[in-house]
Image (cartoon, rainbow, N blue to C red):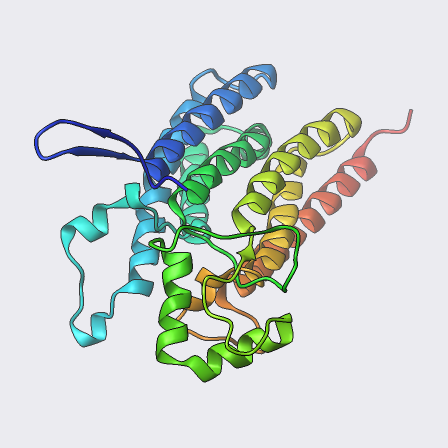
């Protein structure tokens, strides 16, 4: 893993972090793809560019604020420093909060300018999947969004360097709560007293592969299903992303580590947000189907 992608001999040393680099690369590639798709769809040339810039700024701010609320304790007077709040280049973004605020600001912009929301979001959906996939490469190099310990002998597991948080969190658990550590590993097939590091699920690789697969699937579905309502591609993105995220959250160790909310009915907060995304997608899908049916009924007889 390589959290610091490049170190320049400027001043006391200037670090270029992997997460920040791939966050920017993901945004740029996504914006270029969405822009080209928007032109093909007959949308105004600057529509997607404006939406992308507005939603990116609003989304990143919301994603950072929501993440920081999980890692600081305002009740105890721990507000964090300015550098902590601004340090998105080190990782720490809550995608659901950022995505929700980004979509809200995008809808407001489109409504204000009289642009078709469904067609615009259809142009952006595959691009968003590509952008998220590239951003997850930054997560992999940075060592964030790590997985839970995998069963003994699991072929798709990985070990991070000991100084990174995925492994240091295991060291802390082993040192502070050795009995809980042993009880946790026993069902996974590890001998009693197995010390860290223990291989973990390669959740970052799964997320990267999932996002690029989703982008490809959306483009293929778009070409196959030509008779569809505006917004259908975006709805498919919501449903697929929500389902994939629900499964992924169950295997992420970081989600359990930073969540002070605990679980509700056995589900983590991220899984409930995934279910909410699926529910909203289903509502939009039903609305789209009813609208298409109403338009078909209103058609004059041939």
Residue 108 x/y as whole percent: 41, 39
Is residue 117 toward the left or the right of residue 221 in the image?
left
190 and 12: which one is in front? 190
- Residue at 30% across / 63% down in the picture? 71
Q: Residue furthest right?
A: 302
What count of labels does the image hold? 0
Residue 7 x/y as whole percent: 23, 31
- Residue at 60% across / 77% down in the picture? 186
Displayed quadrant of residue 22: top left
Q: Is residue 72 visible?
A: yes
Q: Is residue 240 above or below residue 117?
A: below
Is residue 78 toward the left or the right of residue 284 in the image?
left
Is residue 32 toward the left or the right of residue 86 in the image?
right
Figure quadrant of the N terminus = top left
- Residue at 41% across / 41% down in the picture? 141
38 and 140: which one is in front? 140
199 and 25: which one is in front? 199
Figure quadrant of the C terminus = top right
Displayed quadrant of residue 56: top left
Q: Residue furthest left?
A: 11
Q: Is residue 207 above or below residue 274?
A: above
Residue 6 x/y as whole percent: 28, 30
């Amino acid at each position: 893993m390589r959290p610091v992608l490049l170190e320049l001999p400027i001043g006391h040393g200037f670090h270029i972090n992997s997460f920040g680099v791939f966050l920017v690369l993901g945004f740029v590639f996504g914006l270029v793809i969405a822009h080209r798709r928007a032109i093909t769809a007959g949308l105004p040339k600057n529509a997607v560019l404006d939406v992308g810039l507005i939603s990116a700024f609003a989304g990143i701010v919301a994603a950072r604020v929501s993440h920081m609320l999980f890692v600081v304790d305002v009740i105890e007077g721990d507000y964090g420093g300015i550098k902590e709040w601004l340090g998105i280049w080190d990782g720490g973004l809550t995608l659901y909060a950022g995505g929700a605020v980004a979509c809200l600001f995008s809808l407001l912009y489109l409504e204000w300018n009289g642009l078709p929301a469904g067609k615009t979001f259809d142009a952006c959906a595959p691009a968003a999947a590509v952008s998220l996939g590239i951003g997850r490469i930054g997560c992999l190099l940075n060592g964030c969004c790590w997985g839970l310990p995998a069963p003994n002998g699991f072929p798709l597991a990985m070990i991070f360097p000991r100084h990174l948080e995925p492994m240091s969190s295991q060291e802390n658990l082993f040192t502070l709560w050795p009995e809980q550590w042993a009880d946790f590993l026993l069902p996974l097939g590890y001998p009693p007293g197995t010390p860290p590091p223990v291989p973990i699920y390669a959740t970052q690789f799964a997320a990267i592969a999932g996002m690029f697969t989703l982008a490809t699937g959306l483009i293929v579905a778009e070409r196959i299903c030509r008779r569809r309502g505006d917004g259908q591609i975006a709805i498919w993105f919501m449903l697929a992303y929500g389902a994939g995220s629900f499964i992924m959250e169950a295997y992420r160790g970081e989600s359990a580590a930073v969540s002070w909310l605990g679980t509700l009915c056995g589900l983590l907060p991220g899984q409930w947000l995934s279910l909410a995304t699926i529910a909203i997608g289903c509502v939009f899908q039903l609305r789209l189907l009813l609208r298409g049916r109403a338009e078909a009924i209103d058609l004059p007889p041939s």
